[in-house]
Image (tube, rainbow, N blue to C red):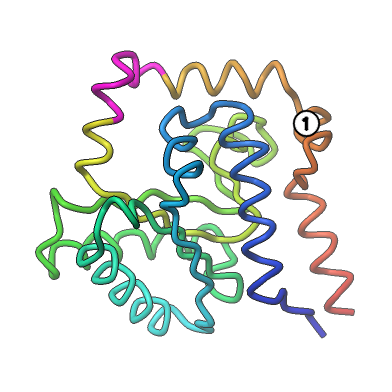
């Protein structure tokens, strides 16, 4: 039977990924500030269906909207037990964006996407460039638009971040990624298959 992670383990793995990969490799130059200031909310959804996850997403969007931005700037909604297939997850992103519109939060909050099997269009599944968006578990990243605007003003070359990230990942390679303590997708799939046996 598949062994589900505890909420604490999911948060610990996500925080490790944030510190070692996202911040450590400077994949997102805006992440370090909110991390150092403890302005990131880590939430593990217990959802087992897209419907349940949608309910959690609505709750977290409202929580972020109503919170003081000096105390809570961004939320990582980790959902280990649902949308584990990337194509299903990708389809859900349209629902997430529609939810922003329904709640009147367009232009106020943005949703970024991270997944263990993340794959950009026109890339092979094992392309190292995909790892810029590969988190330990499926994750919806809720960001305030005002924070994004401030970050872009602080980093005038923000549009070049993606290109720099690809260069970083190509230099790092799969072995370098593993050396950071990050699993390769094939490792995760193998682990899940073993746990199911």
Q: Position of residue 161 (x, y in %)?
A: 43, 21
At mark 1, the secondary structure is helix
Q: Main secondary structure of the magenta part?
A: helix
> Relative to 39, is 120 on the left or the right?
right
Q: Is residue 115 above or below residue 149?
A: below
> Relative to 63, is 116 on the left or the right?
right
Other residues around mark 1 within 10 Å, as few (<14) / some (14–19) / many (≥20)? some
Q: Residue at x 26, y 53 (%)?
A: 69
Quadrant location, the C terminus = bottom right
Is residue 177 within the magenta segment?
no
Q: Residue at x 70, y 16 (%)?
A: 171
Q: Is residue 80 above or below residue 23?
A: below
Q: What stretch of residues is rendered in magenta?
A: 151-160
Residue picked out by circle 1: 174
In front of the other: 100 or 145: 145
Q: Residue at x 59, y 16 (%)?
A: 167
Residue 134, located in which quarter of the rendered image? Answer: top right
Q: Position of residue 80 (x, y in %)?
A: 60, 70
């Amino acid at each position: 039977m598949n062994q589900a992670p505890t909420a604490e383990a999911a948060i610990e793995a996500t925080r490790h990924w944030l510190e070692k990969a996202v911040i450590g490799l400077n994949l997102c130059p805006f992440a370090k500030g909110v991390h150092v200031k403890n302005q990131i909310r880590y939430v593990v959804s217990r959802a087992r269906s897209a419907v349940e996850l949608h309910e959690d997403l609505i709750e977290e969007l409202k929580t972020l909207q109503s919170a003081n931005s000096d105390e809570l700037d961004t939320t990582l909604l980790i959902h280990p037990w649902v949308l584990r297939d990337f194509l299903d997850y990708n389809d859900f992103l349209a629902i997430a964006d529609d939810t922003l519109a329904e709640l009147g939060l367009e232009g106020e909050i943005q949703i970024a996407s991270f997944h263990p099997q993340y794959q950009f269009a026109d890339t092979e599944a094992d392309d190292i460039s995909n790892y810029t968006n590969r988190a330990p578990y499926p994750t919806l990243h809720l960001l305030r638009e005002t924070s994004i605007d401030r970050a872009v003003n602080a980093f005038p070359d923000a549009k070049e971040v993606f290109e720099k990230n690809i260069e970083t990942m190509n230099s790092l390679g799969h072995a370098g990624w593993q050396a950071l303590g990050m699993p390769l997708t094939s490792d995760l799939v193998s682990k899940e298959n073993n746990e199911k046996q």
